Amino acid sequence: MRCEALARFGQKLVRRRPLEWKEGSGGGLARCLSTLDLVALGVGSTLGAGVYVLAGEVARDQAGPAIVLCFLVAAVTSVLSGLCYAEFGARVPCSGSAYLYSYVTMGQLCAFVTGWNLILSYVIGSASVARAWSTTIDSLTGQHMSRALQESVPLRLPLLAGSLDFFALGLVLLLTGLVVLGARQSALVTKVFTSVNLLVLSFIVLSGFLTGRLHHWQLTGQDYALAESEANGTVSLGPLGAGGFVPFGFQGVLRGAATCFYAFVGFDRISTAGEEARDPQRAIPLGTVASLSICFLAYCGVSAALTLMVPYYQLSPHSPLPDAFLHVGWPWARYVVAAGTLCALSSSLLGGMFPVPRVILAMAEDGLLFRALARIHPRTHTPIVATVVSGIFTALMAFLFELNNLVDLMLIGTLLAYSLVAFSVLVLRYQPDQHPGEKEKPGEEMTEVQRGPDPEPEAGAAGALRGLWSPGSAEPTPRSGRAVYGCALALAVLLTALSLALAQWPGRLASGDPLAAAVTGLLLLLVVGLTAVLWRQPQNPAALRFKVPALPALPLASIFVNLYLMLQMPAHTWAQFGVWMAMGAAIYFGYGIRHSAEAARAQTRL
C-alpha cells in the first residue's frame, strides 16, 4: 500500500498539461499587440542601461577593442536560446513562457519550479532597474536625495539598503498603474522610450566613428607610457595587456563574452505576450530574432565607437560614454547620453514588469497558484489582481532591499528557464503528433495520444540497441518518443556533470591532470554517443511557422552553456535560491498540487 501511495504521489508530480492551442484562442486577454510591439518589448527589456556602462567595464579590464568579438560570441550563444523560444512561441503562443513549455514536457513540479523562479527573476530585475533609475536621478541632482534619506531614515540590517528609496517605490507603483491600463498602452509607452534610446545609441555610434581613431585599436607600450606620463598619477589606468586589437588574448575574449552574455537577457519576455499578439505564431519568432539582432548591432556599434574614441585602458568603469565625449571635446553630448540612459531604464523597467502578471496568470489558471490571481479585468483585458500584487511586491523590493547582491539569484532563474525551454524543444520535436480531430481522454497527457502502432521490438539487449540506432519508422512512435525522453534526461545529467567538471577543475584540466582529463573525456564521449542516438530518431514532420535548425545539436549546446554559467554562481547565491525554493515548496505542496487543473481532470476521470 505504501508503494502504491508513493507511486500515485510521484504521478501527481509529473502530470503534464496537454499541448493545445486553437486559432483565435486567448482567454480573456485582448489580442492587440503587433510584431513591432513585440520587437519594442524585446529590445526595451534587453537593451537597458547596461549598454551605457557594460562596454566600458569589459573593454577596460577584460577584452580591449576585442569587446566587439565578446558581444559577437555572447550574441551567438544567446541566439541558441532565442531560437528555442521562437519555435515554442510558434508552436503554442500562450501566456506563461518557459513555465508552460516545461509543463507540457517535464510535468507539474518542474513547471512550478520554472514559473516560481521566473517570478523572482522578473521582480528582482524590475526592482534593480527602479533602483538604478533613482540612483541616476540622484546623481544628476548632486546626491542630495540619498544624503537626506540616509540621515533621516537609515537602515542597518543585512540585505536591506542603506536607506528607504521612496523614488523607486513611487516609480514602480506609477508604472504598475500603466500596466493595469492595458497591453496596448504599455506597448505604446515602451515604443516611445525604446525609439529614443535607439536614436541616442545611433548618435553615439556615428559620433564615435566620426571622432575616433583607428590607431586606438593598435595601441602599443609606447602609447601606454605616454598616457601614464600625461595622467601623472591623477587618473587610474586599466591594464595594457599585449596591446593591439586583442590585448588580453583569446581567454580575455571568452571572459568578456561570459559577462556580455547577461546583456542579452530579456528577449524571453516576448513569449509571455503570446495571448496578446495578433498573429502570435508569426510575431513571436520574428520578434525574438529581430530584437536579438537589433541588440547585437547596438552593443557592437557602441563598443566599437567607444574604443575608437578613447584608448581602452583610459575608459572610465562607471561612466565611460560621458567621459569619452569629454575626451573628444564634446562635453554637451553628456546630456544626450543622460537622456538615453533614462529612456533605456524606463523601457527596461516596463519590459520587466509586463511579463510578471502573465506568468502569475498562467499559473493561477492552472491552479498552481491561488485562483484569485487569475482574474482579468473585463474592460482593460489585463490580469488585474496579478498585476497589482506583482507591482506591490516589486515596489517593496525596490523600496527596502540592496539588490546588487541578488542579481546573481535573478540570473539563476533566467538560465534555468533557458535550459528548460531548450530541453522542451528537443523533446517535443521527436514526439508523435496528436491527430487534430481526435478527442483526448480526460486526464490524458500529451504523449499518450493515438499515434499509430509501434514497430515490433527486437528481443534482447542487442536488439534494443539496434532499435535505438535504427528506429524502423520514418515518423515518431510512442516507443521512439520514450527513447528520446530517456536520452534527453540522461544528456541533461551528463551535461550538468560536464559543466561541473569544467567549472571546478579548470586549472587541473589546463595542466593536463590525467584523472580530470579522463573524467571529462568520458563525459564527452557519452554526450556524443547519446547525441548520435537522438539524431537517429525520426522527427515530427508537422509544419510550424518556425523550427530550430540543427537538431539535436543546437538545443544541447544551449543547455550546456546555460548550465555552465549557472555553476559559476557563488555558494551564497545558491543558498538564497534554496530559501526561495523552500517558500515555493510550501505553496505547491500546501495548495497547488491539490488544486491544479490536472488534478481536477484526474478526479473527473475517476
Image (tube, rainbow, N blue to C red):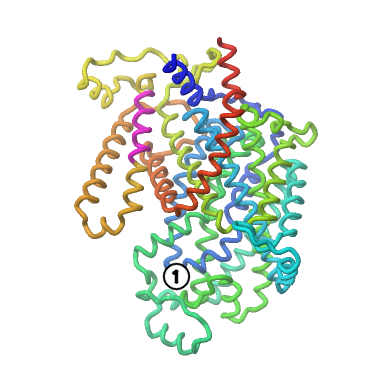
Lateral position of residue 227 relative to residue 381, left or right? left
* Residue 302 appears in view: yes
Please identify the dominant SS of the magenta region: helix
Say few, some or many: other residues with alpha carbon within 10 Å of mark 1 (under 14 / 14 to 19 / 20 or more): many
Q: Residue 199 appears at what percent x and percent y?
A: 64, 62
Q: Nearer the viewer, residue 186 or 291?
A: 186
In the image, residue 259 lies in the stretch drawn in magenta:
no
Q: Is residue 34 above or below residue 143?
A: above
* Residue shown at 47% from the left, 39% from the top: 84
Q: Residue 271 appears at what percent x and percent y?
A: 58, 39
Q: Which residue is mark 1?
A: 61
| Magenta stretch, residue numbers | 481-494
Q: Nearer the viewer, residue 341 or 551?
A: 341
Q: Nearer the viewer, residue 387 or 56?
A: 387
Which amino acid lies under the numbered mark 1 shown in the image of this protein? Asp
* Residue shown at 67% from the left, 66% from the top: 136
* Residue shown at 59% from the left, 23% from the top: 594
Lateral position of residue 434 relative to residue 139, left or right? left
* Residue 89 appears in view: no
Q: Secondary structure at mark 1?
A: helix
Q: Residue 489 appears at what percent x and percent y?
A: 38, 33
In the image, residue 484 lies in the stretch drawn in magenta:
yes
Q: Is residue 93 above or below residue 511?
A: above
Q: Is residue 473 above or below residue 579?
A: above
Quadrant (top left, top right, bottom left, bottom right) of the N terminus? top left
Q: Residue 176 appears at what percent x and percent y?
A: 74, 47
Lateral position of residue 226 relative to residue 209, left or right? left
